[in-house]
Amino acid sequence: MSISEKLTSVRWKVNDVQIGVGLSVVQDCDLDNIITLNPDSTVLFDRGVNLCDTLEQRMVTSYWQLKDDGKKINLMGWEYEIAVLSKEDLRLWLRNYVTPNYDTLDIYMMFKSVPR
């Protein structure tokens, strides 16, 4: 199965978000968020019923693209390294994210697969 097929064969539910070395910053309202990567390169980001902010849109559609021979993914305008991809787990790594205060962070996003 190709990397693209692995990514699109299931949906991906947020399991954890960490910054630096293991500092979890995931909120309860994030834990029902699901990303669906489609074979046509569209992505549906469903924030679930527990929105973190009342101004958030529940459903957002965007695009995704594999890069660097499948080692990276451009997802909704951000380029992540694919650290882990298995039937059950997807872990993305956003290196050197610059905060509004010009601090630099590494962000790890962890997902568990759920059936389509």
Image (cartoon, rainbow, N blue to C red):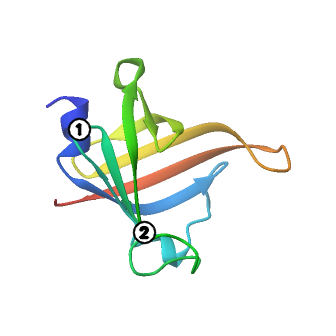
| Amino acid type shown at disc 1 | Asp
Asked if labels 1 and 2 touch by Cβ distance under 8 angstroms, the answer is no
Q: Residues within 10 Å of mark 1 (few under 14, many from 20)?
A: few
Q: From mark 2 to mark 1, how far is it between C-alphas?
A: 21 Å
Q: Which residue is disc 1 drawn over?
A: 40
Q: Up-down: is 26 above or below 87?
A: below
Which quarter shows the N terminus?
Answer: top left
Q: Which residue is disc 2 drawn over?
A: 47
Q: Residue furthest right?
A: 101
| Amino acid type shown at disc 2 | Arg
Who's the residue at 42% across and 46% down the image?
91
Q: Up-down: is 18 above or below 74?
A: below
Q: Residue furthest top?
A: 69
Please tell me whether mark 1 sits on a helix, a strand or a loop.
loop
Label tally:
2
Who's the residue at 17% across and 47% down the image?
9
Who's the residue at 54% across and 58% down the image?
17
**Closer to the camera, 16 or 37?**
37
Please tell me whether mark 2 sits on a helix, a strand or a loop.
loop
Q: Is residue 80 left or right of residue 11?
A: right
**Closer to the camera, 69 or 16?**
69
- Nearest-to-viewer mark from 2 and 1: 1
**Closer to the camera, 108 or 101?**
101
Query: Which label number is shown at residue 68?
Result: none
Which quarter shows the C terminus?
Answer: bottom left
First in residue order: circle 2 vs circle 1: 1
User: Which quadrant of the structure image shows residue 59?
Assistant: bottom left
Q: Residues within 10 Å of mark 2 (few under 14, many from 20)?
A: many
Residue 102 image position (x, y, % from top left): 84, 43
Residue 110 image position (x, y, % from top left): 44, 54
Who's the residue at 47% across and 45% down the image?
76
Residue 28 image position (x, y, % from top left): 51, 78
